[in-house]
Amino acid sequence: VPSSNIRNFSIIAHIDHGKSTLADKLLQMTGTVESREMKAQFLDNMDLERERGITIKLQAARMRFMYNNEAYCLNLIDTPGHVDFSYEVSRSLAACEGALLVVDASQGVEAQTLANVYLALENNLEIIPVLNKIDLPGADPERVSREIEEVVGLDCSDAIYCSAKEGIGINEILSAIVQKIPPPQDTAERPLRALIFDSYYDAYRGVIVYFRVIDGTIRKGDRIMFMASKKDYYADEVGVLSPNQLQVNQLNAGEVGYLSASIRSVADARVGDTITHYSRKAEESLPGYKEATPMVFCGLFPVDADQFTELRDALEKLQLNDAALKFEPETSSAMGFGFRCGFLGLLHMEIVQERLEREYNLSLITTAPSVVYRVNCVNGDTVECSNPSLLPEPGSRRSIEEPYVKIEMLTPKDYIGALMELAQDRRGEFKELKFITEIRASIIYELPLAEMVGDFFDQLKSRSKGYASMEYSFIGYKESDLIKLDIQINGDPVEPLSTIVHKDKAYAVGRALTQKLKELIPRQMFKVPIQACIGSKVIASEAISAIRKDVLAKCYGGDITRKKKLLRKQAEGKKRMKAIGRVDVPQEAFMAVLKLE
Ligand code: GTP
């Protein structure tokens, strides 16, 4: 296919607005996949993704479409749907000339969608508005079109009305892709530059790299080089995604495909890196490459100390496939040996945890996530601290800075008050409130990332009955009046429960945290005091009373099967407990600080 007959596009949509359903229909209509071989949704092909119903990893698919008796090659590049992965979204958009903006016609534009539309506009993409779910009785495509025009400034006079579910408007969408999205430039003569928009680790072939050829040509057998990692390899296999991998001999400027080259870790061929030829190098790499910077850290400890080596092996394996995952050994007197791990955000953290437990059969205790603080010390040094228990002592530090984010919340006007209160409670600094339509508003705040980690998103959803959406971006570090709050259980300091809080909140957090821990830690044979301290000063204290004798007596009575059942139950419960001194502390207690309201 000549490059003039290629169209590269992606789909921008908010979660649940129908992206996967539409992608499936496009694949079906173009005969790319037979409907009988379609899994429920082809593009989201990781189990975890399907279970959570969200797109984490992006993928691509090539379709053939006949338009005015000419064959066109349409490459759909999928984008992940969560804020933690916005860098991956930006790279997949950079690999396209256009995008479908899919909006649920019974809802409206959401914050995350807006953020991605702006990314697409920055990349000069042609945007085709599509109003989905017009089959729903509550659909009001005219209203939503006006909203898109007002909010995004995008002409919606020929927006396409569609129902991905019923297959309405699919042909119009395919035709619009051909008519409106510009073809890629034919720069096959230039030195090779291909943009990586995804990569994953395959146990047999090594890393599989998904890319868009921007300039030049890549052939099977070529000696290639990754410009950021500076690693070079021979391309064993080059192919297209139809959507299954299909080998070809070469790919030219404008085309989208994959390669394998016995690459051992995704860190050598990361999203955003540029592929060039080893012997005829491009002068400059493609713009936009960024190192992955973890924003959130937590400790991961095996419940059973014997699993330490297994945990390390599992993390190493996961890292082969996840360049953003960082980890280093962490030892704590309370928790024993484990790892301090860094993640892009909370969802990323949960995904990794879940994999470790599910795919590697590990039983883990996770400590509350922390952001990275910058501590300016008296001696002039600046140290980064992602582990509250390691915060330099008050005497040696001059000031502490913490990461700030700018958040934008989109909400129906009824919930403006509730959401402003939420942001205010989280030390938010009000920036802007504007009505994007008569009934929907955008609220902008700047607040500490630490206040967002945890239940902020859940709160936003519950306070708006599910109607608000949000988006955030890191804006930099700011000095704050922060102190460390320590917890002692039965007189033993429990470092993983230490937390860094704003001075004005310390007493409230101390009280709430001790109360919460009292609820979460099971009663023991003896009385257990729980104290919150700042330095050596106790600011809040609670006590868990001892189990009474008669309760115990009851437990040990009864017949043997019952006793066995009880023992088994206890053993199961124990799995997620860590013995701190003489007290068993359950997993939930380590996360208590996140849910104090
Ligand atoms: P993520 O993968 O989480 O980003 O979601 P998505 O945007 O891919 O949404 P998905 O395609 O999974 O659709 C979400 C829900 O909306 C599903 O229950 C679909 O069946 C439904 N849906 C999608 N398109 C339509 C449509 O045109 N009409 C109706 N009534 N429902 C639709």
Image (cartoon, rainbow, N blue to C red):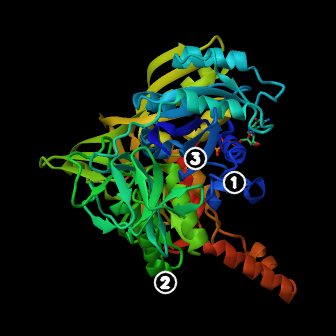
> Which part of the image, by quadrant, shows the C terminus?
top right
Gap between marks 2 and 1 measured at Cα = 47 Å
Q: Nearer the viewer, residue 29 or 108?
A: 29
Query: Looking at the picture, which amino acid does disc 2 mark?
Result: Asp
Residue 159 position within the rendered picture, expressed as x and y whole percent measured from the top left:
64, 21
Residue 123 position within the rendered picture, expressed as x and y whole percent measured from the top left:
41, 32
Gap between marks 2 and 3 measured at Cα = 31 Å
- Image marks 1 and 3: residues in contact by CB distance under 8 Å: no
Q: What is the tally of numbered marks visible in this picture? A: 3
In this view, the mark in front (2 or 3): 2
Could you tell me which secondary element the residue under label 3 belongs to? loop
Query: Looking at the picture, which amino acid does disc 1 mark?
Result: Val
Q: Which residue is mark 3?
A: 595
The extreme bottom residue here reads 560
The extreme front residue here reads 69
Q: Is mark 3 within 8 Å of ligand 1?
A: no
Q: Which residue is mark 1?
A: 33
